[in-house]
Image (tube, helix red, strand yellow):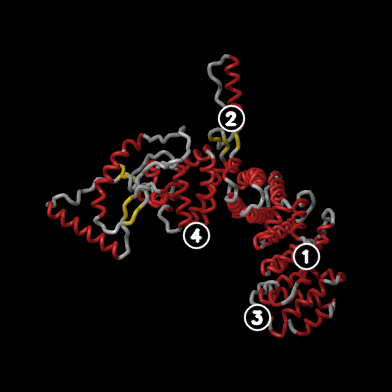
Amino acid sequence: MDAEQLKRLERKETAHIADILSQFNKKHADLLAFDSFHTDNQWHDLWLAIFGILDDATLQSVHAQCLNTVRILTRDEFSLQTHFVEQELGTLLSLARINASSNEDGAQPQLDDAQAEVIAEALKCLCNLVYQSADCRRQCLRQYSLDVLVKRLGTASSTRYPCTLEYYDMKLLFLLTALEPTARTRLQIDLNGLTYMTKWLDDKLADSATAASEEQLNIICELLKVMFTVTSAPDKSPNEYEIQSLHLTGVLRELLLRFGRLSTERERAVVTHAINLLTNISDSCLTELTLKCSSADTGAQSAQSAVASGTTEPQPASKCCALCFEKRNVRSLAVLLDYLRGGLAQQEAEASSHELLSPVLTVLVKCARSDRTMRHYLRKEILPPLKDVSKRPEIGNELRNHLCRFLTLPAMILRDLAAELLFILCKEDVGRMIKYTGYGNAAGLFAKRGVLDCRRIEGAEYSSDSEDSDTEEYKQQQQSFNPVLGCVEQAKRNPLEGMSEEQKEYEALQLVNLLEKLRKDGIVQPALIDKDGKPQPLEHILQLQEELPQQQLEQKRKT
């Protein structure tokens, strides 16, 4: 922008403002580097000229264009940090109708298209400022912007409020709560924001007559992000927070059922954010993810009627849904597993980060730990009865195969989550874990838990009504099953066959020397299993020979 154009903006020459702003906005729509604006104080002069126009109520026809220019200028973090913008921020809050005076107003008035455009552009500018500047965030809180946003959230479902404004309201709310800890506390404690947000989400899901538009899905994603930041460190009392969480979990269940087809990228994004939010929900509330099937009550009534009428046997109740498991509707769990399968396929195809899968694995661990029915269903899907054990457990494309591969990953978070999930599904039974994963894959978990010697874990509380049942196919191959590999190992020729005793002794000494060299070079660290079931480093490789008879004797006693 040349000096003459800038002077015309400063003089508010009505005939030229629209054309000057239109040219500037088109030319700099994607501008990110503002070095040229730092010479001759150009950024600040343009900033003041634009806000001079915004403060003039007679020039409302060009306010949307002015705000577009402001949005471009607010990308310059350096200028925002070196200039005082408190007065201009107040103007933006007023134009966005989220300042202190807006908080005192009553119901939101109906907006025409021009008003909605100005509010939307002002909200975009505020999003940039809040992201760039801590001072701007604190001023927004002092101006009660958070209160107004929550109030608008509470009335949006009952008034005709444009989707675009809802979206930018949510985006600004997310930035404030994500970047300002005091905003999270105020939203949760003082404004009871989680209740308002849960009700808003519930109302949106209740309107299932029409398919959700992409705009509505974007709004739901932003809302779920806000709820995630608020619930990451709950400040309410445990009882009060649990009551809120129970309702929220029920709403999230409906969301998973509504968008669980994952047919579009936006539906998948909604489910992703819902899963992220579920990681913050306490285990005791996750039972709300499943519903009691109506056929359960029908079956009980049928049994009572049969006894009353003298009928020998009641008629079996028909399933109320396609995913009725142990008298519970577990479709939401099926959605989580479908999401996991999709994430695994994407991760292998695109070599994406393993950590993208950690939220859904976290939720599955919490579900399996908190409820017997959910654990039974997840075990049925992830660890079905073994039939073909000719391949190693980490080979294949079933969920069990993927999780077994994770057990030896260097990525600690994903490795530990996979191990925890599999171990819980095995009811923390070491023998069962070895059967499904192989001792070699699970050795890291066993070392961490102190069960390398295959002892039972004390204090593990699981029901005994679903004991492991071996299939006939597995029983036929059990004698050839190698517990270290987790599969049937084909018979191999004995490498010591045909050797004299002197040759065997020579090879044994060579092996000892090689192991000792590896130990000294720090490549391997030989260890014994101590009384706590954990590995204890050895000072010399020959200690293995000294302790071997005692370990063999103890192992015989256990078996």
Please name which of the two marks, 1 or 4, marks the residue nearer to the observer: 1
**Is 492 left, or right, of 255 in this rendering?**
left
Residue with the mark numbered 4: 353
Q: What residue is shown at x 69% (from left), y 84% (from top)? A: 39
Where 149 sits versus 206, above or below?
A: below
What is the C-alpha distance between the residues marked 1 and 4? 39 Å
Secondary structure of residue under mark 3: helix
- Mark 4–mark 2 contact, CB under 8 Å? no
Tell me the crowding category of disc 4: few under 14, some 14 to 19, or many 20 or more residues within 10 angstroms, Cα based.
few
Q: Earlier in the sequence, mark 4 or mark 3?
A: 3
Q: Position of residue 406 (x, y in %)?
A: 43, 53
Q: Amino acid at mark 3?
A: Asp
**For numbered disc 4, what is the local secondary structure?**
loop
Q: Residue at x 44, y 40 (%)?
A: 384
**Number of other residues with Cα within 10 Å of mark 2, as a class: few under 14, some 14 to 19, many 20 or more:** some
Q: Say which of marks 2 and 1 sits in front.
A: 1
The local secondary structure at tag 2 comes to: helix
